[in-house]
Amino acid sequence: MRKRLWKSKYAILIWTVVLVPNIFAIYFGVASFPYTCAPMFAHQVNDDSTLCVLKFEGSNACRTVDLEDNYGRSEVFFVRYFFSKVYGSSDAVSPFDTRLSDDSKYFQQRMDDFFEDYAAYLATEEQLTLDKITLKVKQVDVFRHDLAPCDVLGYYDVNLKKYVSAYEVSENKF
């Protein structure tokens, strides 16, 4: 009987010390050591770190729209999902990546699929009919104030349903 009592107390202790904080971190999106899987965009590493954020911008013949208010989820969730599951790590082998045999064809397909779904969401849920969605990165300080102009990483042509990386085309396309 005493062994059983100790086993249940041990289980409660493990649950309280390990699982509850991790469940809290997952649910509320807390990303601070040790309750995170990896450092993400715009998280300060040290005082000399260059901080960047991903920005999505939609446009059509009439206007250009900052899509930050049209993610359908919090900015943190949306950008983390995009960076970890779609865009991916720049390292050839990343401990947080399962795409060890990835190549440009698979990257292109992931980007096309993501932006096709996102453009459809924007059209149906947000009533934004766009011709192009531009993906940008900008350097910020610890308070997310702009430090430098945005650099274009690429754009998605909604009509052609194709993502075009910035390195593939000349500057005047953007």
Image: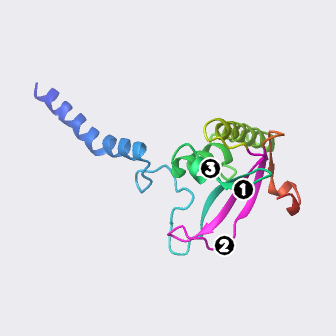
Is 41 inside the magenta-drawn segment?
Answer: no
On the rendered structure, is 115 left or right of 33?
Answer: right
Tell me if residue 109 can be seen.
yes
Q: Can you say whether 24 is above or below 91 in the image?
A: above
Query: Which is in the foreground here, disc 3 or disc 1?
Result: 1
Query: Which numbered dot is residue 8?
Result: none
**Residue drawn at 68 percent across, 44 percent down:** 128
The answer to whether the residues at label 3 and label 1 have Cβ atoms under 8 Å apart is: no
**Residue drawn at 86 percent across, 54 percent down:** 168
User: From which residue to which does the magenta span run?
Assistant: 130-157
The answer to whether the residues at label 1 and label 2 have Cβ atoms under 8 Å apart is: no
Q: Gap between marks 1 and 2, in whole Å?
A: 20 Å
Label 3: element kind = helix
Count of marks overlaid on the render: 3
Q: For label 2, count other residues whose C-alpha is less than 10 Å away and answer few (under 14), some (14-19) or many (20+).
A: few
Query: Which is in the foreground here, disc 2 or disc 3?
Result: 2
Q: Gap between marks 3 and 1, in whole Å?
A: 23 Å
Is 131 inside the magenta-drawn segment?
Answer: yes
Q: Residue 170 occupies which quadrant of the picture?
A: bottom right
Q: Earlier in the sequence, mark 1 or mark 2?
A: 1
Write down the residue under mark 2: 148
Write down the residue under mark 3: 83
**Residue drawn at 45 percent across, 54 percent down:** 31
Write down the residue under mark 1: 64
Q: Can you say whether 106 is above or below 87 in the image?
A: above
